[in-house]
């Protein structure tokens, strides 16, 4: 066991882990880290609102439903591109939300069980369809991609060329666009999102349509998650939704500060995670999640330490 | 049910309002007219439907029959003239907003979609905070406040709505004596400026002192009118005493059967 | 639930016996299912049902056993509203699986079992810790454990690929599950876990019931609530871990929740809930193994989940009491009854307006009163005839009520007027508001409520609009006095003095 563990962790070589990725081929490192940052920041910003509305696990459900959405979009449109993927993911996201509501309202099954049932069934249907299509050889999504994502392959995509200048891999640009979209939406509709999350009763008494904002948020969530899916897979996308937002919530009780902290967390965790994956030679997306969770744990423990120290001091004085 | 008969100046008019929760009736056939400039207490035992009435007025709960008019129009059309103070427990006090942010929410009804609160709005919010003596706390996170302070923040938010009709759900619950006095002083001041206030209240001992009009409720309207005339032993007995067991049993049966 | 308990115990003993027999009967050496991939579909189906292949026997037995484990533990998750904790734990075991594999660089069932159980319990502990030491809500805590543990697991799994040596094949099967990969050791482990779960649930049935239903009360009785909670979590972790191989990390939670939710739709008793949940889980397992085998080693987990989902859908649709079809049928038959009763009431009103001189009701009069066409009125009278509530004249234009119809009509009118009187007298609701409510209530008032209303209203004889309320004698006399016109004796009698 010990020997195996030692084999598991390669020696930490400063040059190989920290310097080489940026000196040998900086473009590859840059695109991977940038992609990780875009994914974590876009997901994390949306995740802040999920946490405030106690809907973290609806995010879990929707990110699982992306897979059947993609397969179904392929079955309908007979080919795969980014637009069919978006359409499929949006459809699947709404199907999940509606299925949860249907099960919850039409039977005595409680909401938590309804969430579990809805997304696992859709996910199972997705896997079955995927494996049936795979045996026919017409359609291929790697099971590894569903689970781990393929962020390491992002730099290998043929770059988008615009006016003779190579701008970068298309998925990175797309994710960057998604981050900008999320930022614009949050800035523009800050007050509407705030009041419908904080006090739905007041916002309805002010004449706002809370249901519309709810479904709008779900729609943006589905868009962000489907863009992230390719890079980090279905389950690690949940981490990208929840962990940065939790980190921010641990450190601040002001929403604007939290949104800023989310972006910082996204940047730091993607950079740390990238180097972690270079060191351990493991899944890059997984390492980014581990780095992010590590940051949260550090903030958590530091907070506990702080309160314990305060208590001790007050007892002594 | 034509609108021609209604007085546009009447802040609140309810006709034959029945409200059901999960098909189970909670309020039966309420008829109510509130004249302008009154400080009205809504009183009744637990589960009498006091909060339900407030929520049904604003359309937060659907009415199974009857109608509500606010200033002679359906609620939707005059929602900008109504201020609302929900029960304190209805929100999450860990929410990451400051006192100032909460008070500014009162201005949201006057802002367009995606429009930011202006300097003017902040000015008003600051004045409202000053009125409830909470200005020093403007930048505090709302979780770090006492119950009385939280209630004052909600009150300041309602003030910031600059409404003509205020609906308040149990604003005196869980507040200290000083806050209670401050709140009632503020309500009187609003009333003196011609505002109409409808306040859900549970403490019978202070009813005579606080309100000049009462609505006594127990699943149906028992009585409504000036406090002097209505606040009698007999009517209180009718409100709190003989529970309408058959009515509530039948309501229960409908709720289960539906 | 005293009835189910001994039966449950008997079933467990019998199940255990069969299980041991099957295990001993299975020879140790066996071709793996994979090698059969070349045969035809029908051939594979024959092989499945004849149980020729020992490896198939393992796969089937294992799938059924894991269905039982997951069903039992899932039942407690669902009644305690902890389904999402189950989801978190099933993802959280992944790092444990990797470390267990690392122990000997083989898929040693026991090492993986121990590693995964430890990881699962760590996950459950982290959720508790987050809840007690931070302000994060429960959904966030659960989501954090789910995602971060899974992230660690993903890293470890990919790191293992770099470690030289060992038999790494089949490790990816932990993601979506492959029942065909179950070996004799796996099935033995599953059997032990299933027996453990069954035993614990049987022996401590009442303790688990009370601690799940009302922990506060259980604590007041001196039961160690925490011990039972954590023992349940341990059993849950066991069930998850033992199911991993065949169902996969991602979908274990479905095997926990769906059979239990299905059972929850069908029964109100915890005892039956456990039994049904285990049975549904077992069936889903068997069906999943079947499709996986017949479909040339398609992943097993998704098929099990879809099989469970099919049963769930059937239960949601056709459940005898809470099913959508049953509720729809109840709604339809109730609406039909209400329509009939409204016709009867109109007939009564027509008769009443004529002072009960005639017992015949003309379809024209009825149509006029109900503001309908004559055809509609005739159709309604026809409906009454079909239900034995009225007889029609030869031309179908007029009708008279049968004794039963007369009785029902009196009851409905009586309910309506009593309720109006109650609302105006006791609830002080304005007389012009009560009619609409009474229109609905008249159809749902039970006999007992009517008696209480009469008592409360001092057997009043007139409704708020001054019309007479038909009394009990009217019902009886009307029925007995056929074919003479129903001449209610109560009518015209002086009112009792005002209360």
Image (cartoon, coloured by chain):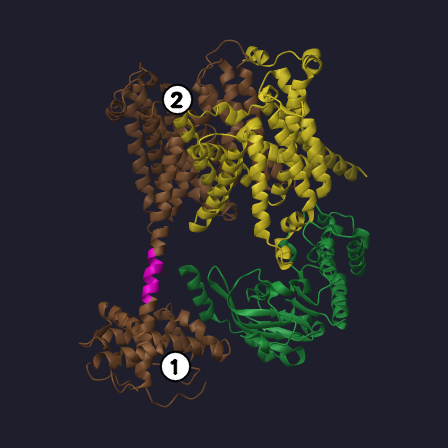
Q: Quadrant of residue B108?
A: bottom right
- Tag 1, which chain? C
Q: Main secondary structure of the magenta part?
A: helix
Q: Is residue C486 visible?
A: yes
Give the residue drawn at x 74%, y 48%: B98
- x and y, in percent, of residue A246 in the image: 65, 36
Residue B42 percent location from the top left of the image = 62, 70
Chain A, chosen colour in render = yellow
Any magenta on residue C335?
yes
- Distance from disc 2 to disc 1, alpha carbons, whole Å, reads 75 Å
Q: Which residues are magenta?
A: C329-337
**Percent x, y for residue A259?**
70, 39
Q: Which mark is residue C459?
A: 1
* Chain B palette colour: green
**Which badge, 2 or 1, is on the more N-terminal residue?**
2
Which disc is residue C186 wearing?
Answer: 2
């Amino acid at each position: 066991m010990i020997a195996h563990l030692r084999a598991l962790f390669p020696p930490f070589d400063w040059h190989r882990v920290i310097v080489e990725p940026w000196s040998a081929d900086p473009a590859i490192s840059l695109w991977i880290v940038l992609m990780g940052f875009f994914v974590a920041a876009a997901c994390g910003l949306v995740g802040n609102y999920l946490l405030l509305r106690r809907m973290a696990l609806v995010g879990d459900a929707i990110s699982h439903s992306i897979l059947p959405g993609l397969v179904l979009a392929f079955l309908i449109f007979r080919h795969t591109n980014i637009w069919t993927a978006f359409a499929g993911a949006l459809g699947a996201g709404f199907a999940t939300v509606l299925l949860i509501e249907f099960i919850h309202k039409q039977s005595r099954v409680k909401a938590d069980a309804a969430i579990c049932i809805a997304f696992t069934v859709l996910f199972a249907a997705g896997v079955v369809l995927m494996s049936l299509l795979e045996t026919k050889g017409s359609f291929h999504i790697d099971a590894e991609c569903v689970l781990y994502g393929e962020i390491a392959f992002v730099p290998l995509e043929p770059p988008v060329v615009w006016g003779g200048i190579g701008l970068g891999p298309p998925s990175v640009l797309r994710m960057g666009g998604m981050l900008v979209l999320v930022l614009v939406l949050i800035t523009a509709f800050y007050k509407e999102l705030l009041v419908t999350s904080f006090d739905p009763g007041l916002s309805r008494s002010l004449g706002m349509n809370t249901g519309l904002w709810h479904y709008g948020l779900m729609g943006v969530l589905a868009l962000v998650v489907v863009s992230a899916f390719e890079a980090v897979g279905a389950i690690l996308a949940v981490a990208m939704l929840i962990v940065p937002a939790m980190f921010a919530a641990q450190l601040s009780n002001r929403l604007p500060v939290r949104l800023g902290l989310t972006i910082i967390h996204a940047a730091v965790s993607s950079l740390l995670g990238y180097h972690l994956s270079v060191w351990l030679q493991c899944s890059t997306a997984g390492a980014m999640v581990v780095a992010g969770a590590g940051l949260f744990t550090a903030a958590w423990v530091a907070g506990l330490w702080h309160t314990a120290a305060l208590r001790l001091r007050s007892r002594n004085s | 049910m034509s609108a021609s008969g209604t007085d546009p100046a009447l802040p609140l008019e309810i006709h034959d309002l029945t409200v059901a929760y999960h098909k189970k009736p909670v309020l039966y056939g309420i008829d109510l007219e509130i004249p302008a400039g009154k400080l009205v207490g809504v009183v009744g035992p637990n589960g009498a439907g006091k909060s339900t009435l407030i929520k049904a007025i604003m359309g937060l709960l659907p009415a199974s029959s009857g109608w509500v008019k606010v200033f002679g129009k359906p609620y939707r059309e005059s929602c900008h003239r109504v201020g609302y103070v929900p029960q304190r427990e209805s929100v999450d006090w860990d929410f990451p907003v400051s006192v100032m942010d909460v008070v500014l929410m009162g201005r949201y009804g006057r802002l367009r979609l995606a429009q930011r609160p202006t300097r003017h709005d902040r000015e008003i919010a600051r004045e409202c905070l000053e009125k409830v003596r909470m200005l020093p706390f403007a930048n505090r996170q709302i979780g770090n406040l006492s119950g009385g302070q939280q209630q004052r923040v909600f009150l300041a938010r309602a003030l910031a709505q600059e409404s003509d009709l205020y609906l308040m759900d149990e604003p005196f619950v869980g507040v200290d004596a000083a806050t209670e006095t401050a709140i009632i002083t503020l309500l009187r001041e609003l009333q003196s400026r011609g505002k109409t206030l409808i306040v859900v209240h549970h403490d019978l001992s202070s009813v005579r002192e606080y309100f000049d009009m009462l609505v006594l409720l127990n699943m149906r309207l028992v009585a409504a009118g000036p406090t002097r005339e209505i606040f009698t032993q007999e009517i209180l007995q009718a409100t709190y005493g003989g529970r309408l067991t058959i009515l509530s049993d039948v309501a229960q049966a409908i709720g289960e059967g539906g | 639930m005293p009835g189910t308990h001994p039966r449950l115990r008997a079933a467990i003993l019998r199940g255990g016996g069969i299980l041991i027999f099957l295990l001993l009967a299975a020879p140790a050496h066996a071709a793996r299912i994979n090698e059969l991939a070349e045969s035809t579909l029908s051939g594979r189906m024959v092989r499945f049902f004849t149980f020729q292949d020992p490896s198939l026997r393992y796969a089937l037995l294992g799938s059924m056993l894991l269905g039982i484990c997951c069903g039992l533990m899932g039942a407690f998750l669902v009644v305690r509203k902890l389904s999402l904790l189950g989801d978190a734990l099933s993802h959280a075991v992944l790092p444990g699986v990797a470390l267990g594999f690392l122990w000997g660089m083989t898929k040693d069932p026991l090492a993986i079992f121990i590693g995964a159980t430890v990881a699962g319990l760590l996950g459950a502990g982290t959720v508790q810790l987050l809840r007690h030491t931070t302000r994060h809500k429960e959904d966030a805590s659960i989501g954090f454990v789910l995602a971060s543990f899974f992230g660690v697991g993903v890293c470890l799994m990919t790191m293992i690929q770099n470690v030289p040596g060992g038999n790494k094949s089949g490790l990816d099967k932990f993601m979506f599950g492959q029942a065909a990969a179950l070996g004799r050791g796996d099935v033995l482990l599953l059997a032990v876990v299933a027996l453990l779960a069954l035993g614990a649930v049987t022996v401590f049935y009442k303790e688990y019931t009370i601690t799940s239903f009302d922990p506060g009360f259980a604590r007041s009785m001196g039961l160690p609530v925490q011990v039972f909670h954590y023992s349940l979590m341990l059993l849950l972790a066991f069930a998850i871990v033992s199911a991993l191989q065949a169902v996969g990390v991602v979908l274990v939670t479905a095997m926990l929740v769906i059979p239990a939710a299905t059972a929850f739709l069908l029964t109100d008793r915890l005892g039956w809930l456990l039994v049904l949940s285990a049975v549904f889980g077992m069936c889903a397992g068997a069906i999943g193994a079947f499709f996986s085998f017949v479909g040339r080693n398609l992943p097993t987990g998704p098929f099990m989940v879809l099989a469970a989902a099919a049963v769930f859908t059937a239960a949601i649709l056709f459940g005898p009491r809470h099913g959508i079809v049953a509720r729809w049928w109840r709604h339809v038959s109730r609406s039909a009854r209400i329509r009939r009763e409204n016709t009867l009431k109109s007939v009564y009103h027509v008769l009443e307006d004529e002072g009960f001189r005639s017992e015949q009701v003309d379809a024209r009069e009825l149509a006029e009163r109900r503001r309908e066409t004559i055809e509609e009125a005739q159709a309604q009278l026809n409906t009454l005839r079909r239900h034995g509530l009225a007889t029609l004249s030869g031309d179908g234009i007029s009708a008279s009520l049968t004794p039963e119809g007369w009785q029902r009509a009196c009851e409905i009118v009586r309910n309506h007027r009593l309720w109006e009187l109650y609302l105006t007298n006791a609830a002080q609701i304005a007389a012009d508001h009560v009619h609409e409510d009474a229109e609905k209530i008249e159809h749902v008032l039970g006999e007992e409520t009517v008696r209480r209303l009469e008592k409360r209203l001092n057997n009043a004889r007139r409704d708020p609009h001054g019309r007479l309320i038909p009394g009990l004698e009217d019902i009886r006399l009307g029925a007995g006095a056929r074919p003479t016109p129903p001449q209610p004796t109560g009518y015209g009698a002086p009112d009792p003095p005002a209360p």
